[in-house]
Amino acid sequence: MIVSFNPPDFTRLRTRALIVGVVGLVVLLAGLFVDRKLFFQAYLVGFTFWSGIAVGSLALLMLQHLTGGGWGLVIRRVLEASTRTLPLVVLLFIPVIIGSHSLYEWTDAAKVEEHPVVKAKLGYLNLPFFTLRAAVFLGVWLGLMFLLNKWSLEQDRTGDRRFGKNMRLLSGPGMVLLIFTVTFAAIDWFMSLEPDWASTIYGFIFVASWSLSALAFTIAVMAALSDDEPLNQIVAPLHFHDLGKLLLALVMLWAYFDFSQFLIIWSGNLPEEIHYYMERMQGAWGPIIIIVAILHFAAPFLFLLSRGLKRNPRRLVIVALLVLVMRVIDLWWVLIPAFTPDHFPISLALLSIVSPIAIGGIWLSFFFWQLGKRSLIPINDPQFESVMEQQHASGH
């Protein structure tokens, strides 16, 4: 069997995504002139979702280097392309710094004076230190991305096995470093939206949810590409089955962390902690959390128990897309009550829908540009032959 290793052409997809992104960005920027605060609040939702896919893909990339297996080989190029969007994520973070006074109440001296607890945290919660920490987080992610992508490309060019060893050796400490940086980034960027509240599990929720978003996105891309060359000659149902099992595991991990946080805080019933959930169980937020519980956990959990569904890319992608949609809705529930705890303004709701679309169009255009730079299959990976044998054994 002859497998094509030529980089694919995604020009049409790149152009369409860019058009959607530009149109969405024009609409989003119109909101900036109407209400500056609402613009930055909605922007944070879109930024969080798409940056989560980039960073989560970095976690999955290192996981597949550590564990090996055919599932990791077939999705590696998609993961690598997602991680190479991190320079764009750095640029997208700049508006968060610019709009910090519209997002973080600890930047408002008058409000800080009213809250002694927040005032005591100003040694940590101040804009110069906040920006410095963000630079460190982004720098670590960029460094890991650069080395893993560089060595993977060198492995393709030379076939030298030492590059595979380098990627495995980096991925162990790299995974630990990623978990720590994502945890502290979540505390800085999202938990500090409500600086008088704290949770020790909060960062782990973002580690799990960003990995979940990345895997769901990767499954959607793989399902779209698996019918065309060269993936139709290498991707087998067993690979989707493995991806489906990992998706089930991450759905359960996210739900475990999220519910653990709720259970601990609700059982403690301390005034300084419980207000987080009280705000998110009133008004429109009550029905939203019920929808999240059903469609983000219960439905994917039940669907992914089916072996037949996991082996069918057309069915599995439906679950993956459902997870992606629910990730956006969950971000609404997590982030927006920090700004408007009593209600969900229509204008903010509309901008919170436009924001992921606008940023997503630009991000996807950049992603497809990166995906088209390399062959969709790691040519000289030592596992390539065994994956081809699995594909033949599956009858494809």
Image: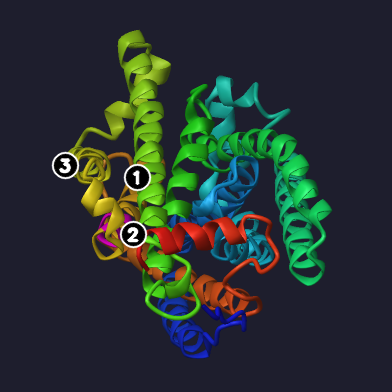
* Label located before the other in sequence (2 or 3): 3
The answer to whether residue 122 is above or below residue 66 is: above
Q: Residue tagged by mark 3?
A: 287
Along the viewing direction, whichever of 380 and 52 lies nearer the viewer: 380
Q: Mark number for residue 250? A: none
Q: Amino acid at mark 1?
A: Thr
Which label number is shown at residue 340? Answer: 1
Q: CA distance from mark 1 to mark 2?
A: 10 Å
Q: Position of residue 226 (x, y in %)?
A: 40, 71
- Compared across the picture, whether 203 is left or right of 312 comes to right
Give the magenta range: 316-320
Snapshot colouring = rainbow
Distance from Cα at disc 2 to Cα at disc 3: 18 Å
**Residue position marked by numbered label 2 in the rendering:** 348
Disc 2 residue crowd, few under 14, some 14–19, many 20+, Cα 10 Å: many
Tell me the quarter of the picture where residue 245 sits: top left
Q: Secondary structure at mark 2?
A: helix
Q: Residue at x 27, y 60 (%)?
A: 312
Q: Are marks 1 and 2 in contact (CB under 8 Å)?
A: yes
Q: Position of residue 393 (x, y in %)?
A: 41, 58
Whichever of labels 1 and 3 marks the residue nearer the N terminus, that label is 3
Quadrant in the picture for residue 39: bottom left
Magenta stretch: helix, strand or loop mostly: helix
Q: Nearer the viewer, mark 2 or mark 3?
A: 3
Amino acid at circle 3: Pro
Amino acid under label 2?
Answer: Leu
Q: CA gap, disc 1 to disc 3?
A: 16 Å
